[in-house]
Amino acid sequence: MKIHFKAPGRVLDIGCGCGRTSLFLKKMGHTVTGIDLVPEMIEEARNLVEGVDFRVMDACELLFEEESFDYVLFSFNGIDYIYPESKRTLCFREIHRVSAEAAFGFSTHNAASLLSLFPTNRFRMVNLILNVTKCRLLCRYRLEKHPSGVLETYVTTPFRQQRELERIGFEHVQVYGQSSDRLFRLILWIPGPTMSA
């Protein structure tokens, strides 16, 4: 992240939860706005992290002016839990609107990973069996067992994700992690003009 978020600037931390990434970004010298859909998370973040503007907000309806941020981060595969796919696309459009030519980074589940078909531990095996029995193995939203219940988790391929971002208007999309079968995540960066080599 330090490679792409070099110069101190205005950062939007989407899905900030209790403020773990917001604190890290603040320590890097950025002016941080953290948003999350869960009010309890935002309340906890306000108690744990000082000097960050935390707000309860839907990532699909960002209440900011155009080009409000120099950097946007949506970490921990958070975008993959926006359902349905049309709302996930709306989220990308909103990020593009508020960031314009800013750098944008996020992670997403990699459907091209062989681990999705050949699990290496009991947890992944349970999810594989769940998706096979529910005929969801080849769907874009797969089922994932979680302590809070069964989650609908979006999975995509590097090519499909890059194409979607380019259709929305993002340029210079860089994908990390797509060549490793060990990685479930794709990490994508859309560097702003100041980030270009």
Image (cartoon, rainbow, N blue to C red):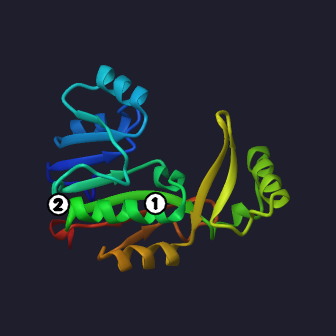
Q: Quadrant of residue 181?
A: bottom right
Q: Nearer the viewer, residue 22 or 167?
A: 167
Above or below, comparing residue 160 to residue 151 in the picture = below
Above or below, comparing residue 127 to residue 89 in the picture = above
Residue 2: image location, x then y, percent: 28, 52
Nearest to N terminus: mark 2 or mark 1: 2
150 with respect to 60 (left or right): right
Residue 54: image location, x then y, percent: 27, 34
- Within 10 Å of disc 1 (Cα), the crowding (few <14, some 14-19, many 20+) is some
What's the residue type where badge 2 is placed?
Answer: Glu
SS for tag 2? loop
Above or below, comparing residue 44 to residue 136 in the picture = above
* Residues under numbered marks 2 and 1 in contact, where contact means CB atoms less than 8 Å apart: no
- Within 10 Å of disc 2 (Cα), the crowding (few <14, some 14-19, many 20+) is some
SS for tag 1? helix
Residue 115: image location, x then y, percent: 70, 61
Residue drawn 24% across the image and 64% down it: 97
Residue 1 in view, yes or no: no
Q: Nearer the viewer, residue 109 or 37?
A: 37
Q: Nearer the viewer, residue 68 or 75?
A: 68
Residue 183: image location, x then y, percent: 59, 59
Real-space Cα separation, disc 2 to disc 1, in angstroms: 19 Å
Residue drawn 16% across the image and 49% down it: 10
How many dots with numbers?
A: 2
Residue 9 in view, yes or no: yes
Residue drawn 20% across the image and 51% down it: 64
What's the residue type where badge 1 is placed?
Answer: Lys
Residue indicated by mark 2 = 66
189 with respect to 192 (left or right): right
Q: In the image, which disc is placed on residue 150?
A: none
The quarter in which the C terminus is drawn is: bottom left
Residue indicated by mark 1 = 87
